[in-house]
Amino acid sequence: MSSNAWFKKGTTSLLRTALLASMVVCIFSSRGSTAGIDKQAVNEVQFEPGKDAFRPNEPLLVKAQVLLSRAHFSSGEIDGKPGPNFSKALFAFATDRGLKPTDTLDENVWRELSNEFTEPPLIEYTIEVADTRGPFAEKIPARMEDMKDLPSLSFVSPRELLAEKFHMSETLLSALNPGKKLESAGERITVINLHQAKLEKPVRLEVNKTDQTLKAFGRDDKLLAFYPVTAGSSEKPAPSGRLRVTGIKKNPTYRYNPKYAFKGVHSTKPFTIKAGPNNPVGAVWIGLSAEGYGLHGTPEPAKVSKSESHGCIRLTNWDAIELANSIVKGTPVDFVGGEQYKAARRGGGRGSPRGRR
């Protein structure tokens, strides 16, 4: 089944999954989102047929997301929750491995993942001086115009830095470390054991604007990696056809041109936003052969594939960096499908300033 056919068939299922997830999250939040998650429970959990795995922060989901990430099938931010990005990664992995296509975790997918990757998903980590040194931003403004005066678009706290360093949500980081402030060098904490092999060099990338995904292919069209993305919007659609990578810039600045006419940006003069992980294009910019378009990171990993972009292709910072480290100038990037604007995906852009927590 093609990815487009799957999307049409699976949209209702994915929306139902997302709705169920949001309902359960609300229930979970009312009980306190800082409930602890036991490291041993995650490391030792096994799939039990018939058991409901789709519960927020349930050990099985944390482990499954980590194992998918090691296979280069990203579900975006590792958060231990169900949702469309997790479902898309499961479907892509099952299809690639010749299993029955499924967007839910089943016994066959679990067996394939757990047999392929045996290292524990969680490990202990000692917070380093570099993790707490900063400087950290007091807050990240909501408006682009207000970002231009900041000396850098750095993290707002050691907690945010550590969550990004280990590819997880801040909520999951806190749940794995209940009662810990996560801000002192020398403190022992529980984190994701990434243990990921280096990505092979892709010869072609494919952005599916319908599915909101990016695939990296090797020779003989072998699927090397799969990522959720945010690709365009009704205001600024992503491009179509074939483009090529024209350059790669890590820790980029962001220059706004008034001719872009982004919604909510009122400046009539160009301005530059300094570099940093909370820069609008995140930690890396991969330029494409169409003016103003690129693949890039994001300051808000939780919103990847659930919001809209200004026409570019947005990934989590760590997924964008992995991709940037494996491709070269001239790599073709094929755009297929069409943008989908569904209420379930619209999380918007940065809507409010974020401060130190």
Image (cartoon, grey):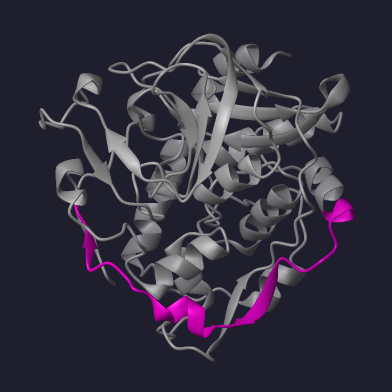
Q: In which quarter of the image is residue 326?
A: top right
Please name the residue shown 28% across and 38% down the image.
349
Residue 30: give x, y in percent of width and height. Answer: 32, 63
Residue 242: give x, y in percent of width and height. Answer: 59, 11
Residue 102 seen in render: no
Q: What stretch is highlighted in magenta?
A: 114-141
Q: In which quarter of the image is the C terminus?
A: bottom left
- In the image, residue 173 sits, relative to residue 106, either above or below, namely below
In the displayed structure image, the side of residue 262 where residue 192 appears, left or right? right
Residue 126 in magenta stretch:
yes
- In the image, residue 245 sits, relative to residue 327, either above or below, namely above
| Residue at the top extreme of this rendering | 241
Please name the residue shown 10% across and 28% down the image.
268
- In the image, residue 50 sits, relative to residue 150, either above or below, namely above
Please name the residue shown 35% across and 29% down the image.
308
Towards the viewer: 212 or 295: 295
Towards the viewer: 40 or 245: 245
Q: Quadrant of residue 345?
A: top left
| Residue at the bottom extreme of this rendering | 186
Residue 59: give x, y in percent of width and height. Answer: 63, 64
Q: In which quarter of the image is the N terminus?
A: top right
Residue 1 in magenta stretch:
no
In the displayed structure image, the side of residue 271 where residue 115 appears, left or right? right
